[in-house]
Amino acid sequence: MLKARHAALLLSLIVLPFTHTFADSHSTPTVVVPPSEMETDPELIAAAMQFFVDLAKSGSDYSQLSLGESYLEGTLGQVDYIEAFAWLSTAHEQGITEAAPLIERAWQSMNDAERKAAQQLAIEYQQWISP
């Protein structure tokens, strides 16, 4: 569990300060830096996503938050509101209150069919965490 918290903290130190949600909530100016070749390498992005999915599935609440925000913003790949909602809801169920406004943003970005799918996926993810 310590390893999962360390990885989530590392992600929050590297990625979150550059996201609009974090910057807005912490009065931090957003810095726009062009991505390096490493940051756009599809294999590295896939590996990073799998790493955070594994941590999130193991119960790391801040990994769930980070993963949900990544899906919401598209920072590690495509924007996916259904995945964003599911991971953010799972983090929120574990007491991460910072997820609430992000959940609302994901919810507002989906149509009714997507909302239903997102709710079902959130239930599935939450069962992994607390069976």
Image: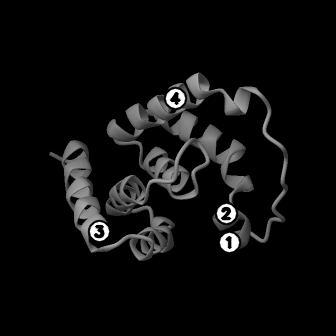
Colour convention of the picture: one colour
Classed neighbour count for the residue bearing mark 1: other residues with Cα under 10 Å, few (<14), some (14–19), many (≥20): few
- Element carrying mark 2: helix
The residue that mark 3 highlights is 115
Q: Earlier in the sequence, mark 4 or mark 3?
A: 4
Residue in the picture at 47% in, 36% down: 52
The numbered dot on residue 25 is 1
Q: Distance between the residues labelled 2 and 3?
A: 25 Å
On residue 100, the disc is none
Amino acid on which disc 1 is placed: Ser
Determine which quarter of the picture holds residue 28.
bottom right
Residue 122 picture location, percent across and down: 27, 56
In the picture, measured across the screen, residue 79 lies left or right of residue 121, that is right
List the residue tagged with mark 4. Answer: 46
- Dot 2 corresponds to which residue? 22
Q: Disc 1 or disc 3, which is closer to the eye?
A: 3
**To which quarter of the image does residue 48 belong?**
top right
The reply to whether dot 2 and dot 3 touch (C-beta < 8 Å) is no
Q: Alpha carbon of mark 1 to alpha carbon of mark 4: how far?
A: 28 Å
Q: What element carries label 3?
A: helix
Q: Nearer the viewer, residue 49 or 113?
A: 113
Secondary element at image label 1: helix
Distance of label 1 from label 2 (alpha carbons):
5 Å
